[in-house]
Image (cartoon, rainbow, N blue to C red):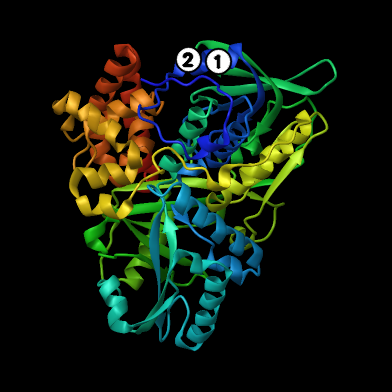
Amino acid sequence: MMVLPFTKHRKDRADMTHTEPLRLVREEQLDRLGSEHFDIIIVGGGVTGAYAALDASLRGYRVALIEKDDFASGTSSKSSKMVHGGLRYIEQGNLSLVRHSLLERQRLRRNARHLVQRLPFLFPVMEKDGVFDKRLAKAFGSLLWTYDIAGGWREGILHQKLTKAEVLSHCPTFNEEHLTGGYMYYDARVDDARLTLDIARTAAFHGAAVANHAKVTEITRNSHGKVDGVIIKAGDREIRARAGVVVMATGVWLRDWTGGKKGEQQTLHVRPAKGVHIAVPWLKIRNDCTVTIPVPGRNRRATITRWGNVSYLGTTDEDYQGDLDNVCCTRQELDFLLEGARSALKTDLQAEDVVGSIAGCRPLVAPPGGKTLEIKRNHEIRIANDGLVTIVGGKLTTSRHMAEQTIDAAQKVIGKSKGCLTKSAYLLGAAGYDAQAIVASGGLSAHLGERYGTEARFVSDILQADSRLLAPVVEGLPHTEAEIVYAARHELAGTVDDVLSRRIRARLMARDASARAAVRVGEILQAELGLSEAVVAQQVKDYLAAVEHEKSVLMGDK
């Protein structure tokens, strides 16, 4: 197996493929944190922090990426899963964000081609009670032309005007009473948790030390008051990691950060905005694209997107003042989304139909006041007087560019200057991946290809070595036990929750079935990682408790 220490970067490595799977052992990563002196330490293993680690690694720096829970366990696994420019940002007048987002969308479509897939968006046109009525349809067509010109054309297909029959062919359950036609345009979608993980793993491939379940408790400073590292708590270990510059990429958790200098004032106003999604059986909706629906009595619209055998419905956008480590979809939010679906579709969706939910907070940068929906999704980067670099805000689609600017800022602190290489750098599994050929092959090959790209062969190697691992792990989902083995060996999955919530997304797509699979997942992790029976039993207990808590809040019992 391949375990890569830090090696000096060569430009051609950005497109490099590999013949052996990258083996990541958590204890080895933790050892590196305490023994090496890094140029850059990045705190926060969401998509921005992960991309910053990859960017810095490709520039040739010694980099450490540290995450207190699991990669993408926060906002970066709770997004709408969309990689897009954002039509409503045009409505806000933020055309520059749309133009840049569409450029970054295409970079992700290339560099993470196995994960980021084209996604059609359908906007129905109604006589009344729609997202917009017939009178505004012409204006909306002009808006879509603006979107195409701003960069939508990069997808290779322009928006289309649809007849009533064509709208119903894409979503047969749509309520046709006031339907007159529609528009379809094209963006992209991604499994956000897998994207974040793949970015972090690619950073490790290029030499970065990456560690999850390692909490930074303190930023350290030298005798001159300049930042020179961090203190990390990882299980029973306390680690002192040293670096020339520290980057805080903790997203909404910056709101609650207490590891700074005593008396230090927060210079960035982080405003968490809660968003939720619920998953229902696809047969209840039968959509083949993302359908935009109105929400009665609200100046809002929601979307319904197919993902495998479920359709997920979202989102909300409200201020959140609560515990950032315990964000759940409430009964009020559930009813809000179900009401919108029932009014727009000919389907009687009930709370009992929901098979999973996610809730997270967007890291908006804004002072109190006004609606969160109206706040621009821009990002901010600050360099404090002591050299601490902070990045917050933005959105999933622009994470690569945010990371580029963050590392540019970090270079100023350490007095170096090297060019960014991530614009054309493939993620692991992307180089040489042929989506059409893989999808055409169908079955297990297609399933593995869309998750691992060209690294799917490493999962099939595990299957070849032990055919018993072909057994499904979660009822109703296509994932095999071999994928759990792969997650433990090569994806730093260390807990039952790591696997079921993020490596295979079972908690969102089949919550109750995932709970029934928790014991078997624990057994596989125990065999692969040498965990004690007591540790595994506690992990299973914690996962089951978290699922029950999520259901109780969702159904209004708490």
Q: Label 2 amino acid?
A: Glu
* Residue bearing mark 2: 28
Q: Are marks 2 and 1 in contact (CB under 8 Å)?
A: yes
Instruction: Identify which residue, 557 or 66, lies in the foreground.
Output: 66
Look at the picture and state if 123 lies above or below 530.
below
Tell me the residue at 50%/86% (across/down): 138
Q: Residues within 10 Å of mark 1 (few under 14, many from 20)?
A: many
Instruction: Identify which residue, 371 or 106, lies in the foreground.
Output: 106
Q: Element type at marker 1?
A: helix
Which quarter of the figure is the N terminus placed in?
Answer: top left
Look at the picture and state if 128 lies above or below 324.
below
Give residue 335's position: percent from left, percent from top: 38, 59
Give residue 309's position: percent from left, percent from top: 25, 53
Is residue 238 visible in the rendered image? The answer is yes
Q: Label 1 amino acid?
A: Arg
Horizontal arrangement in the rendering, residue 497 relative to residue 73 (left or right): left
Tell me the residue at 24%/25% (across/down): 519
* Residue bearing mark 1: 32
> Residue 345 falls in which quadrant of the image?
bottom left
Which quarter of the figure is the C terminus placed in?
Answer: top left
Spatial CA span between label 2 and label 1: 6 Å
